[in-house]
């Protein structure tokens, strides 16, 4: 049977998938700070970091494309 932290993490991951990115990141960070399991906490923190990095790269790529279009390239 799954442990309480595992069940909580599964529930958070299932429910958070329906939320906007920034809310998911906040939920993952909140859960990481309250789950006692260091393994699960570290995984949630890494996931939040990766999602933020992806969003940053996405915004930068979009900005670069807009700049190229504006320069007629």
Image (spheres, helix red, strand yellow):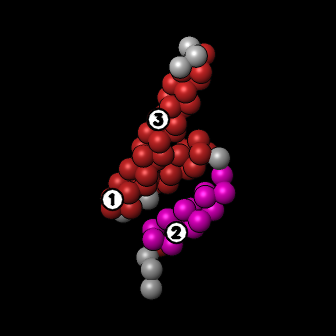
Residue 66, located in which quarter of the rendered image?
A: top right
Q: Is residue 8 magenta?
A: yes
**How far from the left and from the top, in percent, is residue 8?**
52, 67
First of labels 2, 3 by sequence position: 2
Report the Cα–Cα distance between label 1 and label 3.
28 Å
Please, what secondary structure does the residue beneath circle 1 have? helix
Q: Residue drawn at (54%, 62%), measured in percent from left and top?
A: 13
Q: Is residue 59 above or below residue 9?
A: above
Q: Nearer the viewer, residue 66 or 54?
A: 66
Which of disc 2 and disc 1 is earlier in sequence? Answer: 2
Q: Is residue 25 left or right of residue 53?
A: right
- The residue tagged 2 is 10
- Farthest residue toward the front? 73
Of the pair 10 and 66, the residue shown nearer to us: 66
| Residue mark closest to the camera, 2 vs 3 | 3
* Residue 12 higher or lower than 63, as above or below: below
The residue that disc 3 covers is 57
Residue extent of the magenta highlight = 5-19
Task: Measure how far apart labels 1 and 2 are at the Cα level.
Answer: 16 Å
Q: Residue furthest left?
A: 38
Reading the image, the residue beneath label 1 is: 38
47 vs 55, nearest the viewer: 55
**Residue drawn 46% across the image and 35% down it:** 57
User: Mark on residue 25?
Assistant: none
Q: Which residue occupies 43% across, 76% down?
A: 3
- Pointer 2 with pointer 3, Cβ within 8 A: no
Q: Residue at x 56, y 30 (%)?
A: 62
1 vs 3, front mark: 3
Task: Give yes or no for residue 37 being in the magenta stretch.
Answer: no
Q: Tag 3, which secondary structure? A: helix
């Amino acid at each position: 049977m799954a442990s309480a932290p595992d069940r909580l993490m599964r529930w958070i991951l299932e429910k958070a998938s329906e939320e906007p990115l920034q809310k998911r990141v906040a939920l993952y960070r909140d859960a990481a700070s309250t789950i006692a399991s260091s393994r699960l906490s570290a995984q949630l923190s890494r996931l939040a970091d990766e999602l933020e990095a992806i969003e940053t790269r996405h915004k930068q790529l979009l900005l670069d494309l807009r700049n190229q279009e504006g320069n007629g390239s």
